[in-house]
Amino acid sequence: MPDGVVMMIENTFDMNSSFDRSCVEIDLDALKHNFEEIKKATTPGTGILAVVKADAYGHGALETAKTLIDSGAAGLCLATIDEAVELRKHGIDVPMMTLGYTDPTRFRDAVRYDVEQAVYSFEIAKALSDEAIKAGKKCRIHIKLDTGMGRIGFKTDGSETDEIVNSCTLPGIEPYGVFSHFAAADTDDDEYTRYQFDCFMKQIDELKGRGITFAKRHICNSAGILRFPGMHLDMVRAGIILYGLMPPGCPAPVTDIDLKPVMNWYAKVIHVKTVPAGTTISYGRHFTADKPTEVTTVGIGYADGLSRRLSNGFELIIGGRRCPIIGNICMDMCMVDTTALEERPKVGDKVTVFGSDRSADELAERLGTINYEITCDVGKRVRRLYVGG
């Protein structure tokens, strides 16, 4: 099992024996629940691809992938070839695809480990074709169309149709899928989303007229799944909603969905003391106690992913109460004012950063970012503890 990962068989864990400073508890039952909710919201007959890139948004790709496959995921979406190879080496044998760029020097691994590739230029397709021929195999590809994201993909104005056809008819290439990505499905700009979908379908129809067809068409991300059921097509790609979080700012879904947070981030109290008025706390002396203050030191810092921008004011939860961070967050520790607590904290007590008691969205709002970044930023040295499942 990878370093920093502990599998928990019980549905609860003992604070003192399970981790020494900080951990994230990953609730696999909540993950399964979310997948079932997504399935209810997805058009019958449409496959659900589970997005487990970026170590499953910080949740741990291997264990989440196993749970999602058992729940019925049609395949997995990754960002890099290394992410896919790592899962293959741990026995994951379902279809996998990379959603973006793979360096041509890694196409040998893509073919060897049967990792389906996003293709958005003839040069990429040709290099994959060459590797597939050398290996005596077929390489499945997904043609990526740029319908308005402006990132990667073939143009959909007809100017690159010949290039797509040439890419799909190379020896050793199996044109299995075609996909695109919504830029604004999580906003109220439905007109742009419908424009993107129309561009997507128009290009697919044009390719069909040239004899190029695909087994799988997919364009819906998390917001698209929830808001545009008529666009589900053959497959959808579920990302942030798998982990119990909504795309920030997303308008109400077409049907109600009950999502449960999968990640709970905890730390421990490591020291408690009372300081007199006038005492300064932490680097830079940016906090000065204006009265006798109970200072509780917590074993978590910015190297664990607790952003230094949360210094001086953001609250951690101790004993069911919100207690403000005082002074600058350090690399490995932070200090919290627990003077207002009725019961003095003890070394080893649990401290909650986010989870079921408070959404990661609250941290994201404070930092001016999105919940995706909050879970992805939880450091690798923070132990992942898996419960449920």
Image (spheres, rainbow, N blue to C red):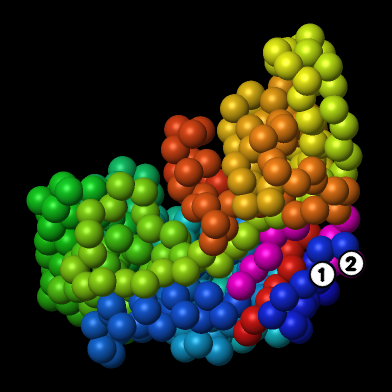
The answer to whether 142 appears left or right of 363 in the picture is: left
Is residue 258 in sight in this rendering? Answer: yes
Q: Amino acid at mark 2?
A: Ser
Is disc 2 placed on a helix, strand or loop?
Answer: helix
Residue 306 % position (x, y): 67, 39
Give percent across and percent down for residue 93: 61, 86
- Report which residue position mark 1 lands on: 14
Which picture quadrant has residue 208? bottom left
Describe residue 163's horizontal placement relative to residue 5 as left or right: left
Taking the magenta stretch, the answer to whether it contains residue 19 is yes
Residue at figure coordinates x 64%, y 42% from the top left: 316
Residue ID at (17%, 48%): 188
Please give the name of the residue rendered at 45% of the width and 33% of the height, measured from the top-left corner.
368
Return the residue nearer the eye: 211 or 325: 325
Give the residues drawn in magenta, as a range: 17-27
Looking at the image, the residue that sits furthest to the top is: 278
- Label count reads 2
Residue that appears at 38% across and 58% down = 246
> Which quadrant holds the N terminus?
bottom right
Spot occupied by residue 22 in the image (x, y as percentages of width and height): 78, 52
SS class, disc 1: loop
User: Crowding at label 2, few (<14), some or many (≥20) Cα neighbours within 10 Å?
Assistant: few
Q: Is residue 352 above or below residue 62?
A: above
Q: What label does residue 17 carry, if any?
A: 2
Mark-to-mark CA distance, 1 and 2: 6 Å
Q: Which quarter shows the C terminus?
A: bottom right
Nearer to the camera, 222 or 309? 309
Whether residue 251 sits left or right of residue 139 in the image: it is left
Instruction: Tell me whether circle 1 and circle 2 mark residues in contact (CB < 8 Å).
Output: yes
